[in-house]
Image (cartoon, grey):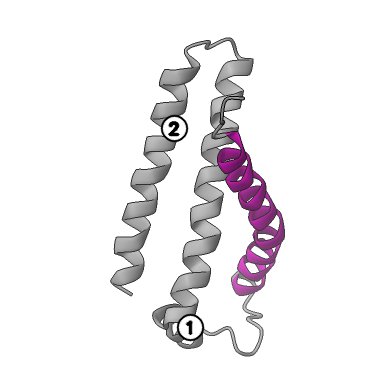
Amino acid sequence: MAKSNKPIIWGAFAAGGEAVSLVAPAIILLTLLAAIGRVPPGLSYEQMHSFAAGWFGKLVLFAIVFLSLWSQAHRLRITCFDFGLRADGLVATLFYMLAGAASLWLILILGNI
């Protein structure tokens, strides 16, 4: 029986989709509250920056963005296939390399916080 890399890809896709579905509504709500000047206590810029500057905050941010990148790369791959682009190897390589490059860029960004 041949081994497959599909569990790795599907695992990242599922985890990223879950992270996006849990975090995106909270981010949208906080953005709308900030727009009308009703920032909840504990979510000022200074407090959020101090959270993001710590190792745990960087780990949380990395996990959310990393999983989201890989989930969307896989979703774009499947969308291209559904639209009739049958060069799946090339498309998969392109989107996963873009997700990998964005992940490395994310590490650099988080390192500078």
Q: Position of residue 1 (x, y in %)?
A: 62, 25
Q: Inspect the magenta stretch and tell me whether residue 12 lies in it.
A: yes
Q: How crowded is mark 2: few (under 14 residues within 10 Å), some or many (20 or more)?
A: some
- Residue behind mark 2: 95
Q: Where is residue 81 in the image (x, y as percent from the top left)?
A: 58, 17
Residue positioned 66% across, 62% down in the render: 23
User: Of circles 1 and 2, which is in front?
Assistant: 2
Which of the two labelled residues, at mark 1 and mark 2, occupies the earlier sequence position?
1
From the image, which quarter does the C terminus lie in?
bottom left
For residue 36, which quarter of the picture? Answer: bottom right
Q: Disc 1 to disc 2, how far (Cα)?
A: 31 Å
Q: What residue type is labelled 1?
A: Phe
- Find numbered disc 1 in the image and state the secondary structure of the residue it sits on: helix
Up the image or down, 103 lies above or below 76; here it is: below
Identity of the residue drawn at 65% across and 57% down: 19
Q: What residue type is labelled 2?
A: Phe
**Boundaries of the magenta span:** 6-34
Q: Name the residue under label 1.
A: 51
Residue 50, quarter of the rendered image: bottom left
Judged from this view, the residue extending furthest toward the front is 1
Spot occupied by residue 83 in the image (x, y as percentages of width and height): 60, 14
- Give the percent coordinates (x, y) of residue 44: 53, 85
> How would you classify the magenta stretch by its main secondary structure?
helix
Is 58 contained in the magenta span? no
